[in-house]
Image: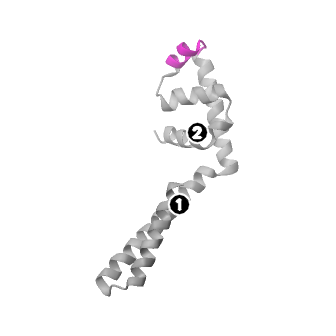
Amino acid sequence: MAKNLEISILFDFYGDMLTDKQREMIEYYYNDDLSLAEIAENEGITRQGVRDSIKRAESQLLEMEDRLGLARRFKEMKSGFDSIRNAANNIREYNGRCGRSRDIEECAVHILDITRRLCEL
């Protein structure tokens, strides 16, 4: 299951760099959850042909990630934003318990707003 999720994520990042046929095969197999036999029947090719196409596409997706690292960087950025958001919420909570500085509250809210907007991009 972890490999399926990894390939699906890499497909989101690099799918446009695959051939049309490879994109179709990955889409059918990982996103539409069709079996190799179902894809082969729908496409009029052998099951082995489908498997080979999917394996080549997977290999290319993994190679692109090794070279470019876009999915890894995205995951790291998301984790960083989550940490920043948690810290800003902790600051707001602490501020509420220990003094209610309006400036601190505004800064924490501003940080939360920035991280929310950046995560929406």
Q: Is mark 2 on a helix, strand or loop?
A: helix
Q: Taking 94 as reference, is 38 left or right?
A: right
| SS at mark 1 in the image | helix
The residue depicted at 37 percent of the width and 74 percent of the height is 90
Relative placement, left or right, of 29 versus 94 is right
The percent coordinates of residue 13 (x first, y second) are 60, 44
Task: Check the picture and name the quadrant holding the C terminus.
Answer: bottom right
Q: Is the magenta stretch mostly helix, strand or loop?
A: helix
Q: Which residue is located at x 42 percent, y 83 percent?
A: 103
Please identify the residue farthest to the left as the structure is shown.
97
The residue under label 2 is 11
Residue drawn at x 68%, y 50% is 68
- Residue bearing mark 1: 118
Tell us which disc is closer to us: 2 or 1: 1
Boundaries of the magenta span = 37-46
Q: Judge left or right: residue 121 versus residue 103.
A: right
Residue at left offset 41%, top offset 68%: 86
Rendering quarter of residue 97: bottom left
Q: How many labels does the image show?
A: 2
Residue furthest right as drawn: 67
Mark 2 belongs to which amino acid?
Phe
Tell me which colouring the rendered structure shows. Answer: one colour
Q: Residue 37 or 107: which is nearer the viewer?
A: 107
Magenta includes 41?
A: yes
- The answer to if 18 sits in the magenta stretch is no
Q: Above or below — where is 42 with respect to 28?
A: above
